[in-house]
Amino acid sequence: MANKDYKELAADIIKDVGGPENVDKVIHCISRLRFYLKDEKKADTDNIQQLDGVAGALYNAGLGQYQVVIGPAVPDVYDAVVEQLGDGVVDEKATSEAIAATEAANAKQQKPKNIWEWITRGFQLLIGTITGSMIPIIGLLAASGILKGFLTLFTFNLNWIDAKSTTYIIINAMGDSAFYFLPILVGYTAAKQLKSDPIIVAAIAGVLIHPSIVALWEAPTKGMSTLLGIPMNATFFGLPIHIPQYTYSIFPIIFAAWLARPVGNWFKKVLPISLRSIFQPLFTMFIVAAVVLVLFGPLISLISAGLAAVINLLVTTNEAVAGFVIGGFYQCLVIFGLHWMVVPLISNDIASTGHSVLNALVNFTMIAQGAGALAVWAKSKRANIKGLAMAGALSGFAGVTEPAMYGINLKYGKVFWMANIGGAIGGFVAGLMKIDMFGFTGSLIGFPSFFSKTNPNNIWAFVIASVITIVVSFVCVYFWGFKDSDVDDAKNAQKKNVFKEAVNN
């Protein structure tokens, strides 16, 4: 409810995470409160999970965060928490110190002992960086995808808008803006995540998508020298280099955000205070932008493009089989946070090509989890379970599955896997019909993303596969995945959830 008072829930959460004195910092993402605690062992996870309005709780050692799953109401709960804790928990300086302290403690406690642990640690840091960089703009990308979907519907399906009109041009620019300027948006958020200067990194991103740089990439390459078949379409102080397409890209600017911190800090130490305000950003911007343009930008762009091509090949070679596998198992990645490795590939795919088969198939995993929670709502006779299940179902149908998964589906018996059966069958059917997707937003709320300029049947493929996903997931959960006695079993059983242990470890 829009006007619901969350003060009592906020107070209970603060008490159960160890009290105000145990909280260094608190942030939030789309569905979770993320606490940086002085001592995570003081948090009472069992009590927090029983609170009305909380879908789950866990400690993520890789990120150093104690996470409380709330759902769509998380911004309101966050505001109530901050109101009670005070502005100190969101102060920029306090935030940086809290993160640094937490990371230092984690590094000390979990110092890698062998090469495999070093790889695992690096992978966790990469996931954390991508997560922190992408979360603040996911809603904007989703909104842009919905806008472009409706524009396609009104222009090419209903013929209400002329594709050559200035009306179309203006609305299309609104939908394209977030993707075209994605490096600037991600640069700003990645810099805050990595504790670089957000303004300098955003300016570096502006260099990458400057019209003159874009023109170098768009220019004809015939007759140019090549390296391993790659055209050297520019020179830098006489050195031949390759300028790829940086608009819509993500990984080069994340690298720039990482590099800008040590470079900027070094100049901060060596430059006189009277010169620092001008020459620190000057030298940092020049060095980091040059390194990205000359060396790492092309390398990262080629690697990410190659990875996207491999994934696209695997998905399109046999789309029905891919739909079955993705529909059945993709939400497992969400449990471990690994889906954040896929999100940048999807957004890059949509931005550069205008569509994503992979995102189309992932869509049915969200619908399946929402339908599973809906089945629990229909079958349960317990008011608190019904309320939590309906909230999870609505959230799942709106493209955010964590409230359904942590609040209901992973918590009670076989709900999660029974729902995945529906996702697998729905994905298989969608693959048989060669479904495609032209926006970012998934689940039922993302239906505008399935209107196609060239294939009017694509939206019907979405409707048919969605209905099949909902029916199969609902039936499987209702008859074989849940009963009210599972709630008592979950309370009495020892807390050994393998998914939570995997996240914690």
Image: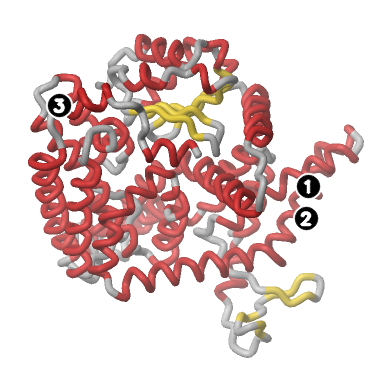
Disc 3/disc 1 C-alpha distance (Å): 59 Å
| In this picture, residue 410 sits left or right of residue 496 | left
Q: Position of residue 395 (x, y in %)?
A: 26, 36
Q: On residue 263, which mark appears?
A: 1
Residue found at x 30% / y 19%: 50
* Labels 2 and 1 touching (C-beta < 8 A): yes
| In this picture, residue 181 sits left or right of residue 232 | left
Q: Where is residue 407 in the image (x, y as percent from the top left)?
A: 28, 30
Secondary-structure class at tag 2? helix
How many numbered callouts? 3
Type of amino acid under label 3: Ser
In the rendered image, which residue does mark 3 sit on? 485
In the rendered image, which residue does mark 2 sit on? 287
Compared with 211, 3 (above or below) is above
Res 96 → quadrant = top right
Q: Position of residue 386 (x, y in %)?
A: 16, 26
